[in-house]
Amino acid sequence: MKQRQACELCGGEAAIFCQPDAAFLCWACDASVHGANFLVARHVRWVACGGCYSLDSARQVSGPAPWLVRSLCGSCDPDHSPSPPSHPASSSYSSSCLST
């Protein structure tokens, strides 16, 4: 099993990985960073599984302050089918241009 990453800003437990920023962040730091402006709010971030800490496409978020999404991946919670986040911000910042 993988070890949980630390948040690169506060040192707490990371819950999100932002590939454009190449950073692991906790929920609070993610909201602070990605709430700064509409450009960084477009970043698609992956939510780490609360059980095995894996990252997968079933748990992606975007927007300035996304709602918490299901914390377990399909391997750790096989009875729960993946569902996309339902926060309005996840669709309000849609764009074909993702910063890299």
Image (cartoon, grey):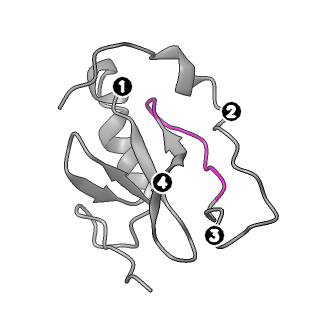
Say if mark 4 contacts mark 1, CB within 8 Å: no
Labels 3 & 1 near each other (Cβ < 8 A): no
Magenta-colored span: 62-70
Q: Is residue 97 magenta?
A: no
**Image spot of residue 68 (x, y percent):** 61, 50
Q: Do the residues labelled 3 and 2 touch (CB within 8 Å)?
A: no
Report helix, strand or loop for mark 2: loop
Mark 4 vs 3, N-terminal side: 4
Amino acid at the residue labelled 2? Ser
N-terminal-most mark, 2 or 4? 4
Q: Which residue position is annotated with label 4?
A: 56
Number of other residues with Cα within 10 Å of mark 2, as a class: few under 14, some 14 to 19, many 20 or more: few
Magenta: main secondary structure: loop
Tell me, yes or no, whether the two marked residues, 2 and 1, touch with CB atoms within 8 Å: no
Q: Mark 2 points at which residue?
A: 86
Q: SS of the residue at dot 4?
A: strand
Residue at image coords 65%, 73%:
76
Residue 57 screen position, x and y as percent: 49, 46
